Amino acid sequence: MSGKDDIDLEDDFTADDAEDAAEAPVVEVAKTNLTKRRLIDNLLEERRLNKQLAEYDFDL
């Protein structure tokens, strides 16, 4: 029975190593995607504000 426990521990150890290795690239991709999303949001906000400014009735 202790042999089976050893195998379970080794499997868990290997799984932890694989998860740690996989997390680093995902974090970088998430940061890149977030940066791109913020850039797109800023551009859309600028367009929206320019449109409002162009349509604004200054004679009020």
Image (cartoon, rainbow, N blue to C red):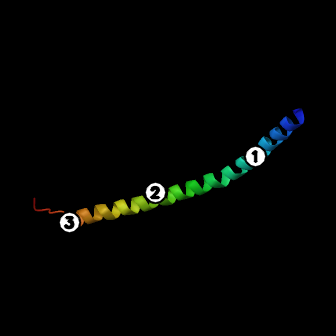
Q: Earlier in the sequence, mark 1 or mark 2?
A: 1
**Which residue matches tag 1?**
15
Badge 2 element: helix
**Which residue matches tag 2?**
38
What residue is at 47 percent from the left and 59 percent from the top? 37
What residue is at 74 percent from the left and 49 percent from the top? 18
Q: Quadrant of the C terminus?
A: bottom left
The one of 57 and 2 positioned closer to us in this rendering: 2
What residue is at 63 percent from the left and 54 percent from the top? 26
Q: Outermost residue, right direction?
A: 3
Q: Outermost residue, top direction?
A: 2
Label 3 and label 2: CA atoms lie apart by 26 Å
**Which residue matches tag 3?**
55
What amino acid is found at the position of numbered circle 2 in the picture?
Answer: Arg
Dot 2: few (<14), some (14–19), or many (≥20) neighbours within 10 Å?
few
Dot 1: few (<14), some (14–19), or many (≥20) neighbours within 10 Å?
few
